[in-house]
Image (spheres, rainbow, N blue to C red):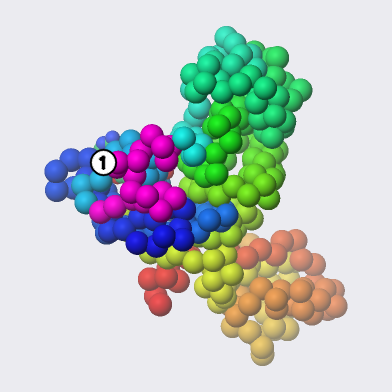
Amino acid sequence: MNKSAIINIEALEYAYTANDLVLRDLNLSVPYNAIYGFLGANGAGKTTTIRTVLGLLRPTNGQVQLFGKPIGPHRMELLSNIGALIESPSLYLHLSGYDNLKIACQYFNISYKKIEEVLALVQLEQAGNKLTKNYSTGMKQRLGLAIALLNDPDLLILDEPINGLDPNGIIQIREIIQDLHQAGKTIFLSSHLLSEVEKLATHVGVIHNGQLRFEGTIEEVNQLKQGLKVHIRTDEATRAVAILEAQYSLKILENNVVEMDLSSEDLVPSIIRLLTEQNIKLYEVKLVASDLEQLFVDLVNK
Ligand code: ATP
């Protein structure tokens, strides 16, 4: 067991129905003070893992340790230092955000003094007195986060925290997570979007078919992504290819899009310069390898 990890999972197995393992020999280790992005496609086993970590499901086999202690005998003590948000928060919609927090304070025996503090942490200080039925999805999500923060936990576990949010809502959640991390908390969050996790995480774990296929720092993920594809949409694909083909491997796709294989995204600025100097118009330049599928392909091909 890795004692220096805040979450440590060893050889975890879980089956909802006999002989149908959803998690198989899953090993995972989250360092203290990480923002750990737990990535996987729909159905990969993220929520099942989180439920097992929180002791809501009992593993068929294997072990979960939190703060260096096994979850089984220490569950209540360990959970008192964890804030969790799984799927949408359950709120009393006919009550204000403030009153929802009051009920949670009563339930957890926490002073009401904490309410203003957590409302500010989740950028809801102006909306505390509004009825939650009038909140946007993002505001409800942030209120759920405020409830999870009431007991000032060292570890936050968030299941798909940006799912269903608009771009503004996503930015707010990202800022809040960064602030909480700065304040010394460890954050474990699941997502099916590598592009989102990349913007936040210090560490990444990739789950596929109930097994951890990759675990490493964000720098290691970036190294894996070397060897990427770029799509350039231009007004003159044939001329663009003629200019670049001596140096790069490339082909023309539909709609005047040129696809290039590059060893590093650092080459992109010089390619843009080369083409614009020749008066070729560039309508769009995008990296197309930064999605989870490509990471899986890279991992499987290693
Ligand atoms: P999503 O992003 O879609 O929630 P996930 O990675 O969180 O996916 P899980 O919800 O953990 O995945 O599901 C993993 C597998 O377990 C899926 O095949 C799912 O159908 C199955 N599963 C989940 N919950 C149950 C349940 N209560 N009973 C039976 N099977 C379940």
Q: Quadrant of residue 238?
A: bottom right
Tell me, yes or no, whether the highlighted magenta stretch contains residue 77: yes
Quadrant into which the N terminus falls: bottom left
Q: Residues within 10 Å of mark 1 (few under 14, many from 20)?
A: some
Which image quarter holds the C terminus?
Answer: bottom left
Location of residue 299 in the rendering, given as x and y in whole percent from the top left corner? 42, 70
Q: Residue under circle 1?
A: 58
**Residue 219 inside the magenta-drawn segment:** no
Provide residue 165's location: percent of width, then percent of height: 60, 36
Residue at (83% x, 78% y) in the render: 278
Q: Percent position (x, y) of residue 41?
A: 42, 51
Q: Is residue 260 above or below residue 68?
A: below
Residue 245 visible within the image: yes
Q: Amino acid at mark 1?
A: Arg
Give the residues in magenta. Answer: 62-79
Q: Nearer the viewer, residue 48 or 110?
A: 110
Image side of residue 117 versus residue 29, left or right: right
Of 280 and 263, nearer the camera is 263
Position of 67 with respect to 246 (left or right) is left
Quarter of the image where ligand 1 sits: top left
Confirm whether residue 291 shows in the render.
no
Residue under the point 73% across and 71% down? 236
Instruction: Please indicate whether residue 72 sits to the left or right of residue 176 in the image.
Output: left
Q: Outermost residue, bottom direction?
A: 246
Residue appearing at x 70%, y 65% in the figure: 285
Taking the spot 55% from the left edge, 50% from the top edge, the residue there is 186
Is the residue 229 above or below the residue 176 in the image?
Answer: below
